[in-house]
Amino acid sequence: MSVERTFSIIKPDATRRNLTGSINQKLEAAGLRIVGQKRLQLTEAQAKAFYAVHAERPFYGELVSFMISGPVVVQVLEGDNAVAKNRAIMGATNPANAESGTIRKEFAESIEANSVHGSDSLENAKNEIAFFFSESEIVG
Ligand code: CDP
Ligand code: MG
């Protein structure tokens, strides 16, 4: 097992419903350490840039609007196999397909308002962490 860092976002549907602590509890119970965390209001430019990989998808415009509809909590998570571990505890993109016990099964409202983002590879994790955090804001 190797210690990795991954990037997470608690999305506006979850901050709106006061679920930050409940989601953090699941992350920590899964063995992930929250080594960086801040609450932000994303700008439209930030949301567009962060999700640029989806720019051609039909849901892109709605996704950007949703991501700026309220505050988010951006996080750096550290632990053994953190990238895959976080994806597992998040559950499937569509909460209807998410396994029981996962964050999305328990909390997500819809395929769009699905409560959390998590990096899908170590390389993307590095880029996404650098998008939001300076080194001095991450304390392992
Ligand atoms: O977040 P995840 O990596 O599981 O899914 P994605 O395919 O990378 O999509 C990014 C985000 O776009 C999702 O988490 C949803 O918020 C949104 N999405 C959507 O609104 N409608 C879809 N059909 C697929 C994704
Ligand atoms: Mg993704």
Image: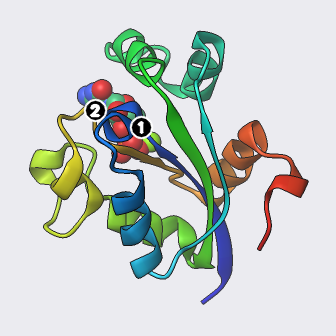
Q: Is residue 72 visible?
A: yes
Answer with left or right where residue 132 lies relative to residue 70. Answer: right
Residue 29: percent from left, percent from top: 40, 80
Instruction: Give the side of residue 6 with respect to residue 129, left or right.
Output: left
Classify the position of the N terminus by image quarter.
Answer: bottom right
Q: Are marks 1 and 2 in contact (CB under 8 Å)?
A: yes
Tell me the kind of residue under disc 2: Ala
In the picture of the structure, the residue carrying the numbered disc 2 is 113
Q: Tell me how the rendering is colored.
A: rainbow
Can you tell me which quadrant of the image ligand 1 is in? top left
- Mark 1 to mark 2 CA distance (whole Å): 7 Å
Residue 124 in percent (x, y) is at 64, 48
| Picture residue at 19% right of the left edge, 70% below the top | 101
> Ligand 1 within 8 A of label 1's CB?
yes
The residue drawn where x is 17% and y is 47% is 95
Label placed on residue 11? 1
Mark earlier in primary sequence (1, 2): 1
Quadrant in the rendering for residue 24: bottom left
Q: Identity of the amino acid at label 1? A: Lys
Question: Count the marks: how many?
Answer: 2
Tag 2, which secondary structure? loop
| Point 40% across, 9% down: residue | 61
Left or right: residue 96 versus residue 137 is left
Q: Secondary structure at mark 1?
A: loop
Q: Nearer the viewer, residue 55 or 6?
A: 6
| Disc 2 within 8 angstroms of ligand 1 (CB) | yes
Q: Residue at x 79, y 60 (%)?
A: 138
Image spot of residue 84 (x, y percent)? 47, 69
The spot of residue 87 in percent (x, y) is: 41, 61
Badge 2 crowding class, 10 Å Cα cut-off, few under 14, some 14 to 19, many 20 or more, is: many
Residue that extends furthest to the front in the rendered view of this protein: 18
Question: Could you tell whether 55 is left or right of 92 in the image?
Answer: right
